[in-house]
Amino acid sequence: MNRWHPRQLWFWLMAPIDVPLMLVTGLLLLVALAMVASAAPERIGNQVFNMSVALVVMRIVAQTPPQRLMHLALPVYVGGLLLLIGVALFGDISKGARRWLNLGFMRVQPSEIMKIAMPLMLAWYFQRHEALLRLRDYAIAAIILLLPTALIARQPDLGTAILVFAAGFYVIFLAGLPWKVIIGMTVAAIGGAPLIWGALHDYQRARILTLLDPEKDPLGKGFHIIQSTIAIGSGGILGKGWGQGTQAQLEFIPERHTDFIFSVLSEEFGLLGNTVLLGLYSLLVGRGVMIAVNAPNSFMRLFAGAITLIFFTYAFVNMGMVSGILPVVGVPLPFVSYGGTSLVTLFVGIGILMSIHRHRMLVQK
Amino acid sequence: MEFRNPQEDLDRFKSRLTITVGFVLVCFGLLFARFFWLQVVQHDYFDTRAEDNRISLVPLVPNRGLILDRNGVILARNYSAYTLEITPSKIHDELDTAIDGLATIIDIQPKDRKRFRKLLDESRNFESLPIRTRLSDEEVAKFIANRYRFPGMDVKARLFRQYPFGAFASHMLGYIGRINDDDLVLIAQADQDANFRGTDHFGKTGLEQRYEFELHGITGFEQIEVDAGGHAVRTLARTAPVAGNNLTLTIDAKLQEIAEKAFGHRRGALVAIDPTNGGVLALVSVPNYDPNLFVDGIATADWDALNNSPDKPMINRALNGTYPPGSTFKPYMALAALTYGKRRPEQAIVDPGYFTFGNYTFRDDKEGGHGVVDMYKSIVESCDTYYYILANDLGIDAIATFMRQFGFGQRTGVDLGLEGSAESEGSLPSQEWKRKRFKKPEQQKWYAGETISIGIGQGYNAYTPIQMAQAVAGLANDGVMYPPHLVQAITDVRTGEKTFPPPKPPRTIPLRQQHIDVVKRAMVGVVTEGTAALAFANAGYVSAGKTGTAQLYSLKGAQYKEGAVREDLRDHALYIAFAPADQPKIALAIVVENGGFGSQAAAPIARQVLDYYLLGKVPEAPAKIVSTVQEGD
């Protein structure tokens, strides 16, 4: 290869990159750096590394044509499903849940793969049945959706199960699931609530009960919610200032650099900070929606739409649980929470959006 | 079944996407509303909660005030020591298992465990309780190095109350112990709840109890920023505690010591009062106990030993022992006779050795009688017949009315223990008293025959030693009665400012000086030529006194022989005195339980006390029993 001029390298690097998407995620990463530096300064180096890896992965995925991704749909989905079964049978137990599979050379968390594999698989499936959609096709889609969801929920990992389910459901919904089916399912879900309740683990039930009345058990299960709402509320309009949040700095907030990092942000930057964050997510969703609308075929539309809505779901579930309007499930704040795995998954999603955007014209024949 | 074309497909997708975008906006709107609610509407509430989380108020317990005698000798003080404490609520294992673990590095005796158990039963919630006190430096170091192994346990530096002289003046000083429910009621009544946050000891008896709120001081507070684990991060503000006030007593510790030692191994009480102001100079109840035993929770074995001892060391005999005054009652009887005009001093009787009233014969101690007896001789030789007749002439109600003026049968109000309940009332018999005392109508009637023995201080008469001391001080002071008290001054340690508890105003008994002089002269005669002459031979000062014997064992008609009666049924020996006779500086009353005759057992104790107080003579041995020719007293 010839000697590369720096400008040439820059153009090569930036070629598949969607600038608006990059700007919004870049700002979110800056927020992440600020919050990790406040909540867990000793981990800032790790997180910079995680971000670098995630950005490289994004760049590679952005380069990959959507058609190739489509071809990967079935193998990745089936592979992911097999790994999930493997987890259920041979998985390592950590913190009371069986989530990891030790392959000898590495430990993988197959449920994480499913966050992308699920919408990929369903988008591919609906693309194949594009011309003619019968209820039977929706039924098969439902099986594709529910099988991995159930395996993940049983691990148990309710947070991931919700995200995987949501990802798949968005595809089915956007593909045109008839309203009568949606209404019917809603009614059935309400009717089946007691059954679902019965199937939940004790700790999962406790979380839901805690949501309803956190003060009932202030030092036990309600502690997390109470302390994080105190943090948010005490932040006020402008916040206590970066690094000045007493709830965060004196360790009253649990998991303050991971799942509860939003309460640190809320406490230190107040309603203003929250609004900025909501704005960034809205821009992210907006850009994703634009990409989806402009996508050339059904597969890309559905895939892009579902991934965009996954970002929203991450953000909404996390902020909702931290501020006490949703039960505590293990969902990180997208792009901001400390941790490599979910960050890589999120940037795979960003990369896919970029790829779809880049290829919006090429496949249109 | 539906057929599709790409444009329709795209349109449907767009409409569906629009719906989801609407959903996204609704959800984000919901979140914003939630944030607005928490951060704007409820901000103040959550701000307060965050501050409450962050700031912990730690009470700083003040140093307890000292107790000093009139010359500045320290009778109660504090010392700092390390204790190993357990917070039971923070122990997750079985408590015994946790203590077993601790016992592998720190010496823990079975008695420590027992005491801890007891404290645990009595404890308020969430307290930390000592399992070991007075740790050596080595033990402290050992524990600190292993602290991580023992969550819920910690070493704390605490101030401990100490009574440097041990078993000395214990009934007067009292002691402190851990706060119990009764104490909490007192604290609440005094509106001191906030001030006692962090305090875990409280005065239980004596001066420690009566002056608890003076001695305690004002609790300080430290505002500490704490993290979620309850660990202190830094101090935000500090209000220093104010040490409790020191008490300076009217007591003379040396005099107290001499008086206590004078009793030897005998049981009894002595109260010495400065008649000119009511200040108590010595207040003895023997046997003593060691108040130090109570400070960090008394061991069961020690408690049982004190409680089961036949000597009853826990009873404050000076305030709660009630004894018939015996012949020490006679000077007051004589004074009553003069005051009411029933006798003139020179008026004499011929004593045959007995007095017959109805079918009863009341015997004099001296067989064959004292011959011709006037008032002087009746006191000096302690003639019973004289007072049998006099009592009959005065009548019970006149006697009661007169004696009440000297404080007999009423609480003195001395500043010890809980006001009103630490002192016994005794009983001053009268017709009304008997009506109240008994329930059955046939027992409620006063019989004239019952008056006779009242005249020699027997019968229903029963008074506490402090009442007797107060009375003799009043007599010594010519009828001006100062209520007895123990605290001379209360010193604010910060400013050095002394406050003097407002003295209770004296009461003056309407008496004629010439009558008082007659009785006083006779009481000097007791010491110079009467029943106490032997005990006071070559005294070097002129004192006035009166011996007495309180009969426990009634031998109808038979002669009382000391040796023949079991010791605990022997008579109590009494002595009252004041000195110098012309200008009294000290007045005292002594009871020696089962001591026999007052002249033999009680007067020699008075001699040692007066010798020290007036001449500075320190005795070499406890007062000996003086054998006298048994002359009746």
Image (cartoon, coloured by chain):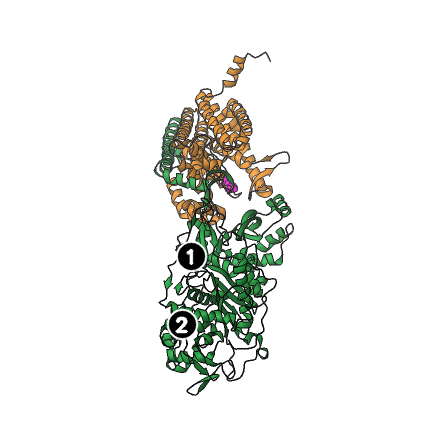
Chain colours: A orange, B green
Instruction: Give neighbour class at mark 2: few <14, some 14-19, many 20+ (Cα, 10 Å).
Output: many
Magenta-highlighted stretch: main secondary structure?
helix
* Three-letter amino acid code at the position of disc 2: Leu
Which chain does tag 1 point to? B
Q: Secondary structure at mark 2?
A: helix
The residue closer to the viewer here, B554 or B117, is B554
Asked whether residue A147 is drawn in magenta, I would say: yes
Of mark 2 and mark 1, the one earlier in the sequence is 1
| Residue type, numbered disc 1 | Leu
Name the residue beneath numbered marker 1. B186
**SS of the residue under disc 1:** helix
Q: Which residues are magenta?
A: A145-156
Q: Nearer the viewer, residue B81 or B287?
A: B287
Give the mark toward the camera: 2 or 1.
Answer: 2
Q: Is residue B446 above or below residue B276?
A: below
Above-or-below relation of B319 to B556:
above
Farthest residue to the left: give it: B41
Disc number for residue B335: 2
In the image, residue B149 above or below residue A22: below
x, y percentage for residue B502?
A: 39, 55
A328 or B416, nearer to the observer: B416
